[in-house]
Image (tube, grey):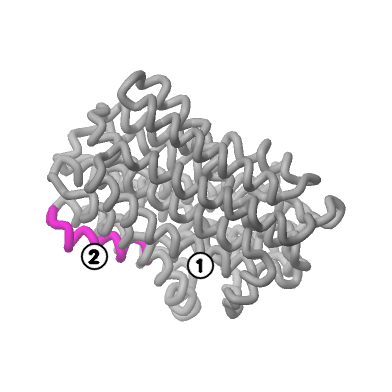
Amino acid sequence: MLRTVTSISSLLLGTGILLVGVGLLGTLLGVRAGVEGFSGTVTGLVMSAYFVGYVVGTAFCPALIRRVGHIRAYAAMAAVASSAALAHALVVDPLAWGALRGVTGACLVGLYMVVETWLNAAAPSQRRGQVFAIYMTISLLALALGQFLLLAGSVTSFVPFALVAMLVSLGLVPVALTRVAEPPLMESARLHLRELYRISPTGLAGAFGAGLVIGAFWGMGALFGHDMELSQRGIALFMSSTIVGGAVLQFPIGHFSDGHDRRTVLMAVSMATALLAAVMFAVVPLARWALYTSAFVFGGFAFTVYSLSVAHLNDHLDAAHLIEASRGLLLVYGVGSALGPLAAGWLMEALGPRSLPAYFALVMALLGLFTLARMRHAPPVPAEEQAEFVPMVRTTPAVLEMDPRAEVEPELDLE
């Protein structure tokens, strides 16, 4: 295992550096939007543009990578994303920020696609699950670390935007210098969402609900902290507590779902997420430590919903259809992520900033009730036929090839 990790260390390092910058940028823009007096609806639209760009990027980035190669495509998209980060500081305007967020989302999905395709090709078949887990863990921890760079300078200054640009650019260096041979980019399979809904309505609903909540968290969490008069350190603690909770609790919750009715676990996790969101709503004006603690547990449950939804869908499929089905859920998750900040922003403008955790609670409670209703329509999948749980966070169709539950493709030789 050590040899495998060493051989892909440059890819993991580049991804980690990049995601530190990405984690800072999202939170920075949310706080700056509050300072500039953007309304909740306007901020939601700006933040939604990122996820729209992300979904659109999954369509055109593969063609770009095939045309110019992994390294050139990565360098070009890193340069554009780095420039877009700086442009946010030069033009403080909602329309401009919305356009820049869309461009950033499209570029970043291309960057992730390059790295994830490489990791998929470089991971030996017997180590795919471990490499997959390491990559997901590094992703969440890097995003959490980026929150604390908010303390590096005033959000109204050029400094934090320059830090984002530097980190995105520096993330290019280990990838550009990697000795791992460039892999072929897998062709995208067709999506059949009606068929996916027929197979697993609960899996599709879970992916959409997870997108609504996690997208709103990424887009509006920092604005929530600002409007609730948290300090910059407090905002960083709130955001990072939620993210770290997602990294720590996914594994025990997910592995518990192996061997149990996955729908029961998904229903319980959804209801627990709703309960923790209600606790956040209650403790915000009372005690900051209680807010950060409840945010940690909330993140642990909320970030697990998408992974459980994918696992539940996979319980109904053979390995040959897993990748196509996972791409479908990823698209549904992306649509939910694009709608989440918009819906949450509108509520925050209409009802106040505390409506964000109330929004989380409402969405997750509805998902829990839907799952409970579906449990009465079909028997559970027998435990011996269940697929193994695999933690999943923000990703692209490329990394689905590395999912250890899928059929194994021939691996690349490492230099």
Q: Is residue 292 magenta?
A: no
Residue at position x 36%, y 19% from top?
287
The residue identified by callout 2 is 99
**Mark 1, residues whose alpha carbon is within 10 Å: few (<14), some, or many (≥20)?**
many
Residue at position x 19%, y 57% from top?
87
Which residues make up the magenta segment? 90-106
Q: Is residue 91 magenta?
A: yes
Residue at position x 39%, y 36% from top?
239
User: Split into 4 quadrants, where in the image is the C terminus?
Assistant: bottom right
| Helix, strand or loop status at disc 1 | helix
Q: CA distance from mark 2 to mark 1?
A: 21 Å
Q: Position of residue 46 (x, y in %)?
A: 26, 57
The residue identified by callout 1 is 331
- Residue type at mark 1? Leu
Q: Earlier in the sequence, mark 2 or mark 1?
A: 2
Q: Position of residue 263 (x, y in %)?
A: 69, 51
